[in-house]
Image: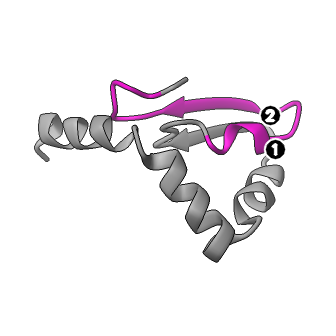
Amino acid sequence: MDRPRWQEYWNRKSETYDREMGALDRRVFGDSRRWACSRATGEVLEVAVGTGLNLPHYPAGVTLTGLDLSDRCSI
């Protein structure tokens, strides 16, 4: 894997990601993000946490660890 290349890609992508995913959430995915995250319990590892779009949907009491390849992860 060419990590620096992918890291730079996701660094750039982070600038528009929320807007693009918002459109997909409205048109395609609906409430699936909220539905999936709300079922989490205990200790959770979120890989590619990125801009943190899922974070508001985790229930209280979840111990969440997030990781991301991008340096510009907003968390």
Q: In this view, does 20 lie above or below 1?
A: below
Q: In this view, does 19 lie to the left or right of 6?
A: right
Gap in angstroms between the C-alphas marked 2 and 1? 6 Å
Q: Is mark 1 on a helix, strand or loop?
A: loop
Confirm or deny contact between disc 2 and disc 1 (CB under 8 A): yes
Quarter residue 27 falls in: bottom right
Classified by dominant secondary structure, the portion drawn in magenta counts as: loop
Instruction: Find residue 7 and name its label.
Output: none
x and y, in percent, of residue 60 in the image:
88, 32
State the residue position of label 1: 41
**Which color scheme does this rendered protein use?**
one colour
Looking at the image, residue 63 sits to the left or right of residue 60; the answer is left
Residue range corresponding to the magenta coloring: 53-73
Report which quarter residue 9 is drawn in: top left
Please tell me the numbered disc located at residue 62: 2
Identified by mark 1, the residue type is Thr
Secondary element at image label 2: loop
Q: Is 58 included in the stretch rendered in magenta?
A: yes
The residue closer to the viewer here, 65 or 49, is 49
Q: In which quarter of the image is the C terminus?
A: top right
Question: Are there few (<14), some (14-19), or many (20+) residues within 10 Å of tag 2?
Answer: some
Residue that sits furthest to the bottom in the current view: 28
